[in-house]
Image (cartoon, helix red, strand yellow):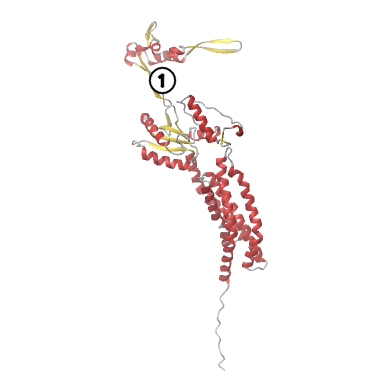
């Protein structure tokens, strides 16, 4: 196989559909179609060079997803691979014209198989090393001298020419030395034939495997793997001792989610601790913290509206959003407390504080949201990572801002009134005694 590096022309020079330049996915389809028109038997996969090398470094396979089939018999692995490939090519994202599903290796390759005849070797008092020496010299070449040309030296190698190396009849007539002066044709002491064999035989963790390389188009990795895993196990009957695993970016996604299951709760707990240290009150810290679920709701809705799956990038966006979301609540609650310290009652402090802080809160949220709009609308390289993060932050800021301005003052007034009511001691009824005099 070989790699071709394609450098894009300016986007303005690309083909246009409805006066709009085609997308990169459409360009990849055109390239694949043109190459297969020239060579119908070619296997074509399109990927970014850095992404391809990164995938190869992680899994040893230059594709987004690796579908690995483990077992002992390579004939069975080949059959199962063909069946799995047929199933995967019917799934959206890897159907014809959408993505690519190809075998990792090119299958069986023709090789020359030479098996020595042990009985004949014993008859002529020969060793297998004698036969190997003849084969190595004729096919691989043997250095017989050195050519000196000025300061440069070149080895002189003798071997059969290319046409004779491909001719079995010529190979069978190669002389094998017997004793001091005797010669035997190679075909007398060995069986020679051309067979198709597997090159190379691949293993993971000492297990023989075959693998399919999958590149997706217009589909997220996680949902595709879930659908592919269900359909493969439904339509492909695996013999005992054979198994299928999905690797590549999916495995990285799974590991990243496991790490996020620890990082996200830790980050949220740390944010709550900082809020508590700022107010010294669990009650008010919880009021500020109410902005987090409001923000998360907006982020989820934004992803749904843009038809984006949950990804690692989106998860990072939710972590960043948690910090941004509490900012508005922190500003509001702090100002309410300042007004109450000046002597205003709770209701008056809430009304005046909400009106006074309306513009600063809206401006802060607008600046943050507008700053992420270019990332949310980007179509350049790396946009698949930027868009989910920006979408989550924008949606979360919008929802948390409006709900904070409406809901937080009401909650603050209600909570503080209940606190004050519980702190007012009940008026005790003291008994009165009349003079007996």
List x then y, in percent, for residue 225.
44, 40
- Residue at (54, 27) in percent of width and height: 4
Regarding mark 1 in the picture, which secondary structure is present there? Answer: strand
Q: Nearer the viewer, residue 221 or 29?
A: 29
Seen from this angle, which residue lies furthest right?
342
Q: Residue furthest front?
A: 18
Instruction: Tell which of 381 and 205 is nearer to you.
Output: 381
The answer to which of 19 and 189 lies nearer the viewer is: 19
Q: Is residue 47 shown above or below 174?
A: below
Residue 158 placement (x, y as % from top left): 48, 11
Residue 125 visible in this rendered orientation of the protein: no
Q: Position of residue 427 (x, y in %)?
A: 57, 78
Q: Residue 14 sits in which quadrant?
A: top right
The residue depicted at 36 percent of the width and 29 percent of the height is 75
The quarter in which the C terminus is drawn is bottom right
Count of numbered tags: 1
Q: Is residue 47 left or right of residue 165?
A: right
Task: Name the residue carrying label 1.
Answer: 111
86 vs 200, nearest the viewer: 86
Report whether residue 399 is seen: yes
The residue carrying pointer 1 sits among few (fewer than 14), some (14 to 19) or many (20 or more) residues within 10 Å by Cα, namely few
Q: Position of residue 83 (x, y in %)?
A: 38, 33
Quarter of the image where one finds residue 332: bottom right
In the image, farthest residue toward the top: 181
Q: With 110 as the anchor, is 144 left or right in this view? A: right
In the rendered view, would you say 50 is above or below 140? Answer: below
Q: Is residue 310 above or below residue 121?
A: below
């Amino acid at each position: 196989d070989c790699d071709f590096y394609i450098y894009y022309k300016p986007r303005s020079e690309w083909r246009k559909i409805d006066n709009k330049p085609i997308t990169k996915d459409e360009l990849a389809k055109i390239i694949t179609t043109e190459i297969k028109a020239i060579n119908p038997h070619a296997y074509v996969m399109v990927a970014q060079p850095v992404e391809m090398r990164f995938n190869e470094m992680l899994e040893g396979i230059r594709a987004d997803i690796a579908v690995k089939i483990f077992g002992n018999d390579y004939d069975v692995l080949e059959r199962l691979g063909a069946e799995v490939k047929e199933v995967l090519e019917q799934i959206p994202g890897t159907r014809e014209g959408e993505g690519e599903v190809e075998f990792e290796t090119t299958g069986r390759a023709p090789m020359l198989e030479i098996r020595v005849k042990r009985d004949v070797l014993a008859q002529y008092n020969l060793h297998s090393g004698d036969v190997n020496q003849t084969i190595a010299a004729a096919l691989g070449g043997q250095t017989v001298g050195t050519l000196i040309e000025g300061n440069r030296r070149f080895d002189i190698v003798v071997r059969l020419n290319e046409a004779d190396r491909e001719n079995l009849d010529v190979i069978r007539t190669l002389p094998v030395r017997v004793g001091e002066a005797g010669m035997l044709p190679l075909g007398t002491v060995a069986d020679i034939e051309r067979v198709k064999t597997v090159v190379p035989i691949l293993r993971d963790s000492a297990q023989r495997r075959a693998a399919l390389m999958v590149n997706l188009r217009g589909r997220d990795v996680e949902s595709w793997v879930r659908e592919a895993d269900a359909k493969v196990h439904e339509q492909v009957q695996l013999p005992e001792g054979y198994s299928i695993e999905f690797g590549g970016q999916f495995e990285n996604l799974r590991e990243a989610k496991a790490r996020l299951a620890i990082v996200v709760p830790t980050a949220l707990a740390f944010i709550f601790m900082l809020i508590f240290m700022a107010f010294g009150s669990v009650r008010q810290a919880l009021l500020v913290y109410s902005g987090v679920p409001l923000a998360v709701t907006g982020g989820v809705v934004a992803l749904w509206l843009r038809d984006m799956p949950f990804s690692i990038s989106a998860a990072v966006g939710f972590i960043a959003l948690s910090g941004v979301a509490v900012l508005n609540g922190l500003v509001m609650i702090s100002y309410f407390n300042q007004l109450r310290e000046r002597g205003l009652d709770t209701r008056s402090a809430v009304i005046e504080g909400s009106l006074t802080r309306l513009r600063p809160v809206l401006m802060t949220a607008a600046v943050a949201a507008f700053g992420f709009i270019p990332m949310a609308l980007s179509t350049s390289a790396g946009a698949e990572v930027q868009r989910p993060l920006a979408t989550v932050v924008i949606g979360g800021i919008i929802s948390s801002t409006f709900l904070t301005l409406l809901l937080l003052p009401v909650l603050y007034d209600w909570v503080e009134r209940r606190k004050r009511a519980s702190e007012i001691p009940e008026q005790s009824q003291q008994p009165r005694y009349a003079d007996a005099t």
